[in-house]
Image: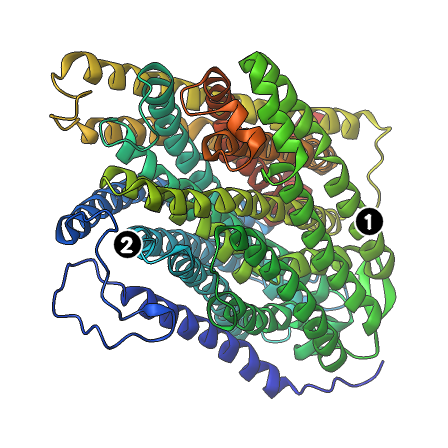
Amino acid sequence: MGAVILPDLGTEILIPVCAVIGIIFALFQWFLVAKVKLTADRDASPNAAGKNGYNDYLIEEEEGMNDHNVVLKCAEIQNAISEGATSFLFTEYKYVGIFMVFFAVLIFVFLGSVEGFSTSHQPCTYDQTKICKPALATALFSTISFLLGGITSLISGFLGMKIATYANARTTLEARKGVGKAFIVAFRSGAVMGFLLAANGLLVLYITINLFKIYYGDDWGGLFEAITGYGLGGSSMALFGRVGGGIYTKAADVGADLVGKVERNIPEDDPRNPAVIADNVGDNVGDIAGMGSDLFGSYAESSCAALVVASISSFGVNHELTAMLYPLIISSVGILVCLLTTLFATDFFEIKAVKEIEPALKKQLIISTVFMTAGIAIVSWVALPSSFTIFNFGVQKVVKNWQLFLCVAVGLWAGLIIGFVTEYYTSNAYSPVQDVADSCRTGAATNVIFGLALGYKSVIVPIFAIAVSIFVSFSFAAMYGIAVAALGMLSTIATGLAIDAYGPISDNAGGIAEMAGMSHRIRERTDALDAAGNTTAAIGKGFAIGSAALVSLALFGAFVSRAAITTVDVLTPKVFIGLIVGAMLPYWFSAMTMKSVGKAALKMVEEVRRQFNTIPGLLEGTTKPDYATCVKISTDASIKEMVPPGALVMLTPLIVGILFGVETLSGVLAGSLVSGVQIAISASNTGGAWDNAKKYIEAGASEHARSLGPKGSDPHKAAVIGDTIGDPLKDTSGPSLNILIKLMAVESLVFAPFFATHGGLLFKI
């Protein structure tokens, strides 16, 4: 089979060192962002200007506005946004904490009952000649890893939200010096979140594996089966973070837009709008905390799926530690590659004009992909034997190390293709979004028709990219190949999250500029940052959906193996009913989340209207609105409304597995995967296109755009209505669907021993 070049000791040093480097780099970026002061300190040394102008004193507004008042106003608004976001997350985590404890007990009871809570050792599932640890041990360790995954996911989302709310006003203040300075602050802040999440996820998983190994010893099959709980914990928290945050942000956004922009004809983020603080809070809890938890879940699950399959292949059977931890080594090298890539945006090149923003963000994707391809080649050469066997539905398939390299690389490049296709369909620099904007001439109806058509069309290329990566990776290395292809797509997660988090930070910066009464010139700069951020947020969602498809397929393969199903025959009634019901679930889930946003937005609209009608002087700007009531409406509605969609996803595998058995459940997983990916891509891109069509008209950067404007014109009002319809599609239903397909698959994998032993009660009657 051939020896591995990288010794086991080298692996045990490399993985934690890379994770620690990622954390240190994130903290260094935070330190640089913190150099932009939120106090009007007259003693700042004017001669201390370094590269990118960190230390130079914030110059006064060109229009002569009082600098001290502007900075204080920005600080005040930032505090309000930060407090609102922190308050919501703590409220959400309180309810989610109760769920975590309940579900942890469920995991322990169900898995422990597989062998009647026996503490005696059992024959191994895949090799009856060997003796493995008792099922009760797997139940206990699966429960512990579930809790660890959930806690890591919560921390990832919370840290991301804190840095975003820390950086938004600083981005606004830097915009006074130029768009380049503001871009660097926003991007560095996004990098803090990206590197903290990637490094924390890797480090916790590595430490957990080593601690569990103390008990499991040579039983690597049992060890990595217990580790699957880590992915389940991460995705469970991500589901509630995505759904709750999505409902929060869109209830506020829709309420603010419909009353403020359409009915009262006041600008976006106008301080007179009572929902404006809730809207800015929503950007952080939905797009930052939610996205952080979501991508952490994908990373944890793809790692767990790869490790489970590897543990019953030659790596696990022969106890080859370096080859076994190949997925973690890929992630480790990914952190180093992303670190180098980040410097291209912040240090090696400087942005001087608005038109350079989007290309700079796109270059991040290209550079990280090219560097990572070389990194994967090196890792595959030093960390894998020249040939080895991979478990493939009951048989061992011989695989070469170059074939596994191609599996990871095809996933990596498929991610880049999905990113660029998403950008093409959601950026207002290209014809699809410009056509949607042009359709606003004849009203909101044609805008909606064009937007829906764009979303459906945007599904084609990403699905082909996913299909090709599945075919190549499965042909070379079976389900393990698909799992590492998903890891390849997520290997540049730090860069992906940096450009994704950049969007909401820029959006908040624009809102703060408007609320602080800063000049039109500053608002133009923050709008330019925001428009590019809108596209990068769509690219981030594309990555999340693409990786979710590969991850859930890999988990599906691991589940089928674990449940001892040799073939999934769609012609049998048991499987086909599961298939058709599974394909329906994303529609049911989307209906619940869309209606939840609608109900919450209805309350918000009524409250905003009430304040405009009953508070004297509000529209004139002589009286402050009651922001707190709107924040409370969004918080209460999102906490209440996130429970039913969450319950649908979490209970479906349990009900189907217990009542109908593993074959029907395999049909449900396949059906939800196939339909969920299509709806998720379509919903996200439709919403993104409508949003940028509105911004295209508002910016008026071209002759065509100016012919549709200005703000307040009939085409602009039609664009606002389209954007309002698209908001829950792109920020609630679409992004949440990728968690649905992953979560059901990983939950089925964790409970597979229970379903295989006690499931299918209806067919046993």
- Residue 565 appears in view: no
Residue drawn at x 43%, y 34% as measured from the top left: 246
How far from the left and from the top, in percent, is residue 297?
A: 53, 51
The residue labelled by disc 1 is: 468
Residue 539, x across and y down, in percent: 59, 46
CA separation in Å, label 1 and label 2: 46 Å
In the image, residue 758 sits, relative to residue 551, either above or below, namely: above
Q: Position of residue 140 (x, y in %)?
A: 48, 57
Q: Is 512 located above or below residue 209 in the figure?
A: above
Other residues around mark 2 within 10 Å, as few (<14) / some (14–19) / many (≥20): many
Q: Nearer the viewer, residue 1 or 368?
A: 368
Q: Quadrant of residue 181?
A: bottom left
Front in this rendered view, residue 357 or 614? 357
Can residue 440 be seen at all in this image of the molecule?
Answer: yes
Q: Residue at x 25, y 43 (%)?
A: 518
Q: Amino acid at mark 1?
A: Val
Q: Which mark is residue 173?
A: 2
Quarter location, residue 177? bottom left
Q: Residue at x 40, y 35 (%)?
A: 244
Quarter of the image where the C terminus is located: top right
Instruction: Using residue 71 as the reference point, say whether residue 398 is left or right of it.
Output: right
Q: Nearer the viewer, residue 139 or 185?
A: 185
The answer to whether 352 appears left or right of 279 in the picture is right
For mark 2, give the secondary structure: helix
Task: Kindly indicate the quadrant of the structure image that contains residue 636.
Answer: top left
Closer to us: 355 or 87: 355
Q: In the displayed structure, would residue 130 be above or below residue 742?
A: below
Determine which of the numbered discs, if any, sits on residue 54 in the image. none
Q: Amino acid at mark 2?
A: Leu
Instruction: List x then y, in percent, for residue 365.
Output: 62, 59
Determine whether, in the image, residue 342 is placed left or right of residue 257. Answer: right
Say which element carries label 1.
helix
